[in-house]
Image (spheres, helix red, strand yellow):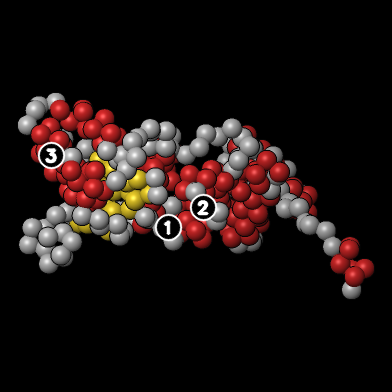
Amino acid sequence: MATRARQVRAVRAVPPGDIIRRELEARGWTQQELAEIMDRPLAALNQIIGGRKQITANTATELGRAFGTSAELWLNLETAYRLSLTRTPAAEERLKGVEERSVLREAAPCLGELTKRGWLPSDDGSRSLTERLLAYFGVDSLEGLRSPQLAAAFRRSPTSTADQVTLAAYARRVELCTEGQVVADYSREGLEQNVAALLALTRDAGAESQVPHVLRELGVRFVVVPTLPGAKIDGVTLHRPSGPIVALSRRLPWLDSFWFTLLHEVGHIVLGHTEDRVEEDLKLASDDPVEQ
């Protein structure tokens, strides 16, 4: 059996044109005669026999009638031959890329948007797309990506369609955008004592530009990150050992939305709400004691 196995070789698909030539030879026909039988220009038939033109359903039907075979025979020959042409090292490398992107899109539906926005680590050719995506999320495997740990409290619209991976992608972007920020030492008591300073800013038009500085002085990192499509995120708070991070998306352009969302997130921090939450907008009549 082992000897027989070593003798097995991959069979190269035969070009349909070779089979047509054999049929013509067996019948003693010329290509001109076959072209007349099929009522086709000789030039078109030459292209089919030479493999420069593919056999279509109509051509397969005509060849079947001319040679007394089924149309499926010629279509199958054509398909097998064309597929064989794709089995080159270069083509296989490209197909691996197709397969990789399919798997990654299944694991992270927001992959296309992350790529479009340039949020993924740069492609210097040393890492695959999978490696760059895992590096972005800070996980070691796709399994870790499929079950992300949010470690974040979101506020978003009730019509949001974001999955957990998309929310994690947004939270990760917020974290990465604040990595270089230098802030004062954080204390919840210090933040609570200075909430009045934030409230005072709401009285002045344009004062929202001062928010990052004020929060940094209180040990809170702040950044504006546009929401991802369909996520409809308004704000998020991340609880990290170095101190809290607050991000707004400015999805709604109005100042009242900016201040309300900001102070809502700060309120959670001041009150010590450190658990992960995904709030679907604020319902004033909510029975949730944390939201009350």
- Crowding at label 3, few (<14), some or many (≥20) Cα neighbours within 10 Å? few
Q: Quadrant of the C terminus?
A: bottom left
- Seen in the picture, residue 20 relative to 285 is either above or below; the reply is above
Mark closer to the chain start, 3 or 1: 1
Mark closer to the chain start, 2 or 1: 2
What is the x, y in percent for residue 199?
11, 38
Q: Which mark is residue 196?
A: 3
Q: Residue at x 26, y 48 (%)?
A: 188
Residue at the bottom extreme of this rendering: 1
In front: label 3 or label 2: 3
Q: Quadrant of the N terminus?
A: bottom right
What is the x, y in percent for residue 50?
69, 39
Element marked by disc 3: helix
Q: Amino acid at mark 1?
A: Pro
Element marked by disc 1: loop
Residue 255 appears anywhere in the view: no
Residue at numbered disc 2:
139
Q: CA distance from mark 3 to mark 2?
A: 40 Å
